Amino acid sequence: MRVVLQRSKGASVTVEGDITGAISSGYVLLVGITHEDTEKDADYLAGKIAQLRLFEDEEGKMNRSILDNGGEILSISQFTLYGDVKKGRRPSFISAARPETAEPLWHAFNEALRGHGLIVETGIFGAMMDVQLINDGPVTILVESK
């Protein structure tokens, strides 16, 4: 699994004109899943993300986790994170898991985050989504399970 994590001061995702998820402060997660991923990968990444210290303490150092800081998560499925552009001009997505594999794992990942006590809002799997966010910092981290 591959997650692009962006610390955010506010974010929302809209599908066909309706907001399906919104947060005021926390992380926006773009979540990509490949063929070999399992629930073990989802659990690992959920724990890692819950414990990452990406918020500043009183001294301005990144010493506080999202659990310490009281933020929320907006999780968005993003198969294009496994797009390969090494050859040609159009990305190949053969490394991305098929929807019947990826969707249950994305849901399991979101449930694992909730299991850590986090509030998780989402987009809609497979939908065309408009994502808006105010990047905080900006802080953007790539987190992978393998």
Image (spheres, helix red, strand yellow):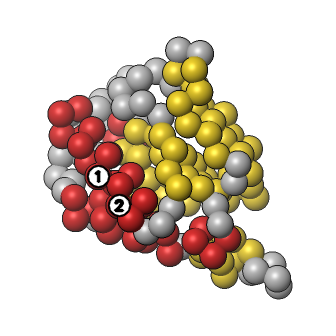
| Residue type highlighted by circle 2 | Ala
Tell me if residue 108 can be seen.
yes
Location of the N terminus by quadrant is: bottom left
Q: Distance between the residues labelled 2 and 1?
A: 6 Å
Q: How many labels does the image show?
A: 2
Location of the C terminus by quadrant is: bottom left
Residue at the image position 69 percent from the left and 54 percent from the top? 25
- Residue that mark 1 sits on: 108
Relative height, residue 18 to residue 57 (above, below): above
Relative height, residue 140 to residue 19 (above, below): below
Residue at the image position 35 percent from the left and 55 percent from the top? 111
Q: In this view, does 97 lie to the left or right of 86?
A: left
* Neighbours of disc 1 within 10 Å: few (<14), some (14-19), many (20+): some
| Residue type highlighted by circle 1 | Ala
* Near-viewer residue (109 or 88): 109
Residue at the image position 76 percent from the left and 80 percent from the top? 57
Q: Quadrant of residue 68 in the image?
A: bottom right
* Neighbours of disc 2 within 10 Å: few (<14), some (14-19), many (20+): many
Q: Do the residues labelled 2 and 1 touch (CB within 8 Å)?
A: yes
The residue sitting at the top extreme is 16
Which structural element holds mark 2? helix
Residue 142 x %, y %: 49, 58
- Residue that mark 2 sits on: 112
Q: Residue 96 carries which label?
A: none
Residue 144 x %, y %: 38, 61
Which structural element holds mark 1? helix
Residue 34 x %, y %: 25, 46
